[in-house]
Image: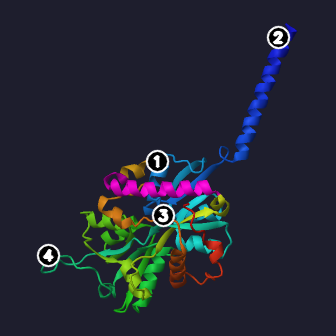
Amino acid sequence: MKKLFKAISLIAVIALLAGVLAFSLAACDGKNDTTLRFAAPDGTPALAMLTLASEGQKLGGKTVDYEVVSPSNIATEMTSGKADIVIMPVNAGATQIVKNGVDYKLISIAVEGSLYLVGHKEVDEAGNVPAITIDDIKGKKIACIGEQGVPGLVFRYVMQANDINIITEGTPTAEQVFVEYVADGSVAAQRYKGEMVDFIVVGEPAATAQKANTANDLNAEMNMQTEYAKANGTQGVDDYPQAGLFVKTALTQDTQLMKDLFAALDKNEDWIEANADKVTAEAEKIGSTSKFPAPAIPRCALDCSDLDEEDVSEVLAFLKSVAPPVKWEEGKDKLFALGLAG
């Protein structure tokens, strides 16, 4: 009986040691003991991780928790180090890295420019709705999203280039615009419906959704990407980097994780392009409250390819043009990680 007890005890010890060894090996290879966090603000940036989140995509053998957060909270994902991978306004993320030294890299432009000034214009003799021009908005009131983000920066840059002064109090003159900065596109639309403003500056998908809403008479737009290119004096440039994909610096050294990430992002873009009518339903699965009308999908301007030197030049040119003064060139090596798709 004692021999049997000893044998059972020995088997138990061996099993315990095997379990400890398996756990240790898993910890050593770094694949099974780490859960990453991937955060994106609601709206178009959340589309960049849509199917990754809805399918629970693993990256580099690691489990990933995906979360759609309020745009007002996205900056803390980086400043607190909470997110391992985060999509946020290019200017905000870049400033945190270059000026404040947070340990992340910009590895991709998740969303190119997708900003529009929307309002109402009478139909012309040919039955078409003309585009809104700079002259149309002079002396008018405008609700604009993203005061400190890319939308606000681009809007102010375009106004300055056209010698239009922005005021936030009082009544605008013929060479001014009154601007009320608002939290999001729905608030901007409420201001318009309440006849508090004449135009709204919103991104996609809000621009398309608001124009399609029969409860208001928004039928015309100004393409802010085109106006930015005009203001910037560039040839053949009709866009700018809006939301960046930032990753903790240490993770950029994980070759397999980076390859898996870019492969998944590319597959996600293909799915969205082929299933525009299903995007809203898929987005609901991951916690998004935004509506994505099918016509808005091509205008959401998803990118998500890895960066090259040309991209770096364009991002730096954009930051120098619109962002607060920072030594961008000196911080170039801190900011960017290139060619990670493999």
Instruction: State the residue position of label 3.
Output: 304
Q: In which quadrant of the rendered image does the C terminus lie?
A: bottom right
Q: Which residue is mark 2?
A: 4
* Residue at image location 76% in from the left, 30% down from the top: 18
Name the amino acid, label 3. Cys
Q: Mark 1 or mark 2: which comes first in sequence? A: 2
Q: Amino acid at mark 1?
A: Ser
Q: Secondary structure at mark 4?
A: loop
Q: Nearer the viewer, residue 251 or 150?
A: 251
Q: Upstream in the sequence, badge 4 or badge 3?
A: 4
Between discs 2 and 4, the one toward the N terminus:
2
CA–CA distance between discs 4 and 3? 38 Å
For image coordinates 60% across by 47% down, the residue present is 61
Q: Which residue position holds label 1?
A: 54
Q: Earlier in the sequence, mark 1 or mark 4?
A: 1
Report x, y in % for residue 167.
44, 86
- How would you rate the neighbour count of disc 2 (Cα within 10 Å): few for under 14, some for 14-19, many for 20 or more? few
Residue 69 in the image: state x and y as whole percent.
Answer: 52, 57
Q: Mark 1 to mark 4: distance in Å? A: 43 Å
Q: Locate residue 126, reporting x and y percent.
A: 13, 78
Kindly report which numbered mark, 1 or 3, lies closer to the viewer in this rendering.
3
Question: Of helix, strand and loop, which one carries label 1?
Answer: helix
Relative depth, front residue between 59 and 161: 59
The magenta segment: 254-279
Kind of residue indicated by mark 2:
Leu
N-term mark: 1 or 3: 1
- Camera-side mark, 2 or 4: 2
